[in-house]
Image (spheres, rainbow, N blue to C red):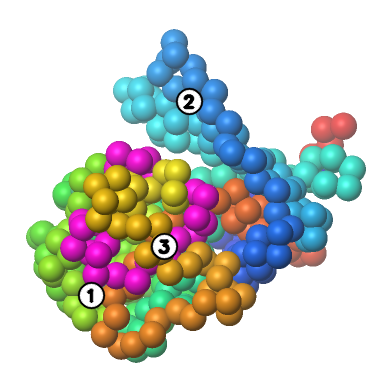
Amino acid sequence: MLILNKKDLEELLPMEEVLDVLAMGFREVKEGRCVVPVRFHLTVEEYQGQFLFMPAFLPGLKQSGTKIVSVFPKNTSKGKPTIYATYLLSDPTTGELLAIIEGATLTGIRTGGASGLATRYLARKNAKVLGIIGTGFQSFFQVRAIQAVRPIEEVRAYDFDQKRLEDFCQRMSPFIKVYPATNPSEAVRRSDILVTSTTSKTPVFSGKDLKPGAHINAIGAFRPDMREADDETILRAMIVVDTYEGCLSEAGDLLIPMSEGKLKKEAIHGDLGDLVTGRKKGRRSDEEITFFKSVGFAMEDVVTAHRAYEKAIREGKGQRIEIY
Ligand SMILES: NC(=O)c1ccc[n+]([C@@H]2O[C@H](COP(=O)([O-])OP(=O)(O)OC[C@H]3O[C@@H](n4cnc5c(N)ncnc54)[C@H](O)[C@@H]3O)[C@@H](O)[C@H]2O)c1
């Protein structure tokens, strides 16, 4: 049995490879070879915490595993992170546990990968300026993934937490030039591609500021009452979702305008599986605004975890332990 930590994952999972395995996973989903039950929540009232269990099984690829995520907001007062995540990769032919994998980095990498894949089909080919609103944990992976598919020359970043914004600029400096913005408009107006990766409940930018031809990856807003994009953006854009099932039950960015009768389900152009299988085309013109909404999907974890495991075995990486 193998243990893979954050550093192992960073070495084992270059973005180009993550995009390939995600594309393979989304094809399996479209072909009906993917079993992902609704995620199970376990509430720990005493400590105001929650565990989420996210299993996935891909029979065609013979991959299975479960992500366990814990969200304990009171941890900050104990000097501990709010979120821990662990991935348990199992052999679906025997049930044997193959690997225990650090799950937060895995999530960052696969969520970046999904945005990268959407960007490949939806952003203009010559997109050079990337805007990002919300410079927390996910933002680093988002930038790295988009850099893998478009010739990004600079990043315009905004976060209302100055410290987070400064940390991001510093962390990104070996990879790309980042200009901090003093408000969202300043970042959005210049951007060919925009990422919103916040925990906001209300829109974080004005759709009026979008350049013609802009592409947006909106990855925050994972509950029906949360949103990052305003009506202007949603009604102007060609919309693609990671999965219909996830977005139509969780994505406030779409569900709020739908509940107000402004947006119809039929207005959603397609999902990522439609794009990677060629069933639907991506961008149709240079002026079109495109909008990718993701809430995450357990298939993305299992294909990414499995790739890390296979490579670790081949390259002798990770720590081996006997538990049986
Ligand atoms: N789509 C997916 O697959 C997926 C996967 C993982 C996480 N997420 C979601 O992505 C979001 C970001 O996750 P994270 O781990 O980076 O969180 P985080 O808390 O580390 O970072 C969020 C950042 O957003 C900033 N922010 C919040 N509201 C803002 C606003 N109105 N304007 C500007 N900045 C604002 C915060 O200051 C913070 O720096 C969360 O909602 C998370 O649930 C989505």
Q: How far apart are the two marked residues, 3 and 2, measured between alpha carbons? A: 34 Å
Number of disc labels: 3
Q: Residues within 10 Å of mark 3 (few under 14, many from 20)?
A: few
Q: Which residues are magenta?
A: 222-246
Amino acid bearing label 2 = Gln
The amino acid on which the numbered mark 1 sits, given as a three-letter code, is: Ser
Against 52, is 116 above or below?
below
Question: Which disc is residue 50 wearing?
Answer: 2
- The residue indicated by pointer 1 is 191
Q: Residue at x 10, y 60 (%)?
A: 182
- Sequence-first tag of 3 and 2: 2
Spot occupied by residue 300 in the image (x, y as percentages of width and height): 59, 56
Q: Can you tell which of label 3 and label 1 is closer to the viewer?
A: 3
Residue 141 rendering spot, x and y as whole percentages: 43, 61
**The N terminus lies in quadrant:** top right
- Residue 42 placement (x, y as % from top left): 54, 23
| Mark 3 CB lies closer than 8 A to ligand 1 | no
